[in-house]
Amino acid sequence: MHVVHIITRLIIGGAQENTLLTVEDQQRDCGDRVELISGPGLGPEGSLESRARRHGIDLRIIPEFRRNLHAWRDWRSYCEIVRLLRQLQPDLVHTHASKAGILGRWAAAKLGLPAIHTIHGASFHYGQNPLAYRLYQSLERQAARSTARFISVADAMTDQYVAAGVAPRDRFVTISSGFDVEPFLSPPRPPADVRRELGLLPEHVVVGKVARLFHLKGHEFVIEAARTVCAQHPQVRFLFVGDGVLRGEYERRLDALGLRDKFVFAGLVPPERVADLIHAMDIVVHTSLWEGLARVLPQGLIAGKPVVSFAIDGAREVVIPDQTGCLVPPQDVAALAGSLSRLIADPELRRRFGQTGRERFTDQFRHQTMTRRIREVYADVLSRRAPVTRGAAPPAR
C-alpha cells in the first residue's frame, strides 16, 4: 500500500507516538510506501522529528502548519498539503489530530483520494472556547463528508462524534492506541535504582502522574488531594513526569501548602524513559479533564500498577472499578484523596488490580495489533473504492 499520514505537529505525545509507530510498522513489517506530513515539532513538550528521521521515515515538514488557528497560515498549509498529495499520489490519506484532520481531508477530497481519520481526542471538548467548540463541530461535520472511515482510540470518541451528528456509527471503528509493551512488562532498569536516583526511599509509596504540566491536565487536583493523603500517610510521595508552563505555579502552591518535600518533578523525559519511571511508581494517577484515552493508563496497568483516574472519555474503558483501579468523578478532590488513600493502605489490593490490568490489556495495546487492524481498515476502504464526496474542500482563491 502507499499511504500518506498527516499530523499537525510532531511533539512528544500519545497521538504523535501512535502515528510514528504505525508508519514504522508499515515500512518495516508490511513493506508499505509511507510518507508523513507534519508541522514543526514546536513546544515545551519536546520534538519527535529526530526519531522519525532516525527511523528512515520520509518526513515532509510544512513550516506554516501550526496548532493554533490562523487563517493565512492555515490556507498556506492546506495549499502545500494539496501540492504534496498531488505529487505523491498515494492510495489513501490517513489524518491525525484536529487541524491536520480537517485540512488533510479537504486536500484529499480535492484530489479524489480516500481519507481515513483517527480521533485521538475530540476536536471539540470540555474547557474549549464556545466559539471554537461550535466551529470545530461544524468543520468536523463538513470534513466527514469526505471521510471513508473514522478510527477512534476509544469507544467514547465514537459516542461523542455520533452524538454531535458528525457521522453515523457504522462509519467508526475502535482501535486502541498501541505502543511497545515490552518495557512495561519487564523493567528496563531496576526500579530500586530509578527510585534512588529520584531521592525516593524503599519505604515510600509513590503516586505518579505522567502528563504535560499544562491546562486541563489536572495536576492541581492531585496537589489539593495530597493535603489529605499526606496527613494520613506520611510515607507517600508524588512523582510528576513531564514539564510545561504551569510548573512554577504548581511549585509555588506546594510551597504554600508545606508539601514541597512530598513531590518530585522528573521534568521532561524522552518516551523511552517513561517505562522506567512507571515501574518506580506504586500507583498511577490520571486527572486530566479531557483526553481520548491517555496512554499512561494502559501503560501503568501493563506494568502491573493500579490506576486512579477521573471518569472521563476513554479512561472508563480500561479503569475498571474494583478490578484494575478506581474511577472518581472529575474534579472531586475528596473522592480522589479517598481512592488514593485506599490503595496506599493496601499493598495486596494494589498488586491484584495491577495484575488484572496486565492480563486484560497487554495484547490489546501492542502496537503490532494496532497496525494490523489499521491496515485491515485500509484494505477494506481500498477494496470498496467508495466515491469521495467532492466540494468539501474550501473554495479556491
Image: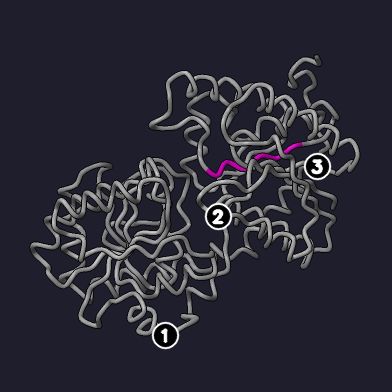
Q: Which residue does the image show at 54% across and 53% down from the upper left? A: 13
Secondary element at image label 3: strand
Please provide the residue range marked out in magenta. 115-120
Q: Mark 1 vs mark 3: which is more N-terminal? A: 3
- Quarter in which the C terminus is drawn: top right
On the image, numbered disc 3 is attached to which residue?
92
- Are the residues tagged 3 and 2 within 8 Å (C-beta)? no
Q: Mark 3 vs mark 2: which is more N-terminal? A: 2
Q: Main secondary structure of the magenta part?
A: strand
User: Left or right: 135 with respect to 260?
Assistant: right
Q: Which residue does the image show at 43% across and 28% down from the upper left? A: 128
Which amino acid, by three-letter code, is at mark 1?
Answer: Pro
Q: Nearer the viewer, mark 3 or mark 2?
A: 2
Secondary element at image label 1: loop
Q: What separation in Å lies between label 1 and label 3 (alpha carbons)? A: 44 Å
**Callout 1: few (<14), some (14-19), or many (20+) C-alpha neighbours within 10 Å?**
few
- The image quarter containing residue 364 is bottom right
Magenta segment: does it hold 117?
yes
Q: Mark 2 vs mark 1: which is more N-terminal? A: 2
- The image quarter containing residue 168 is top right
User: Left or right: 210 with respect to 253?
Assistant: right
Return the x and y of residue 336 as percentages of the image width and height. 21, 52
**Callout 3: few (<14), some (14-19), or many (20+) C-alpha neighbours within 10 Å?**
many
Q: How is the image coloured?
A: one colour
User: Left or right: 211 with respect to 391?
Assistant: left
On the image, numbered disc 1 is attached to which residue?
190
Look at the picture and state if 241 lies above or below 225.
Answer: below
Q: What separation in Å lies between label 2 and label 1 (alpha carbons)? A: 26 Å
On the image, numbered disc 2 is attached to which residue?
46
**Callout 2: few (<14), some (14-19), or many (20+) C-alpha neighbours within 10 Å?**
some
Which amino acid, by three-letter code, is at mark 2?
Answer: Gly
User: Left or right: 246 with respect to 232?
Assistant: right
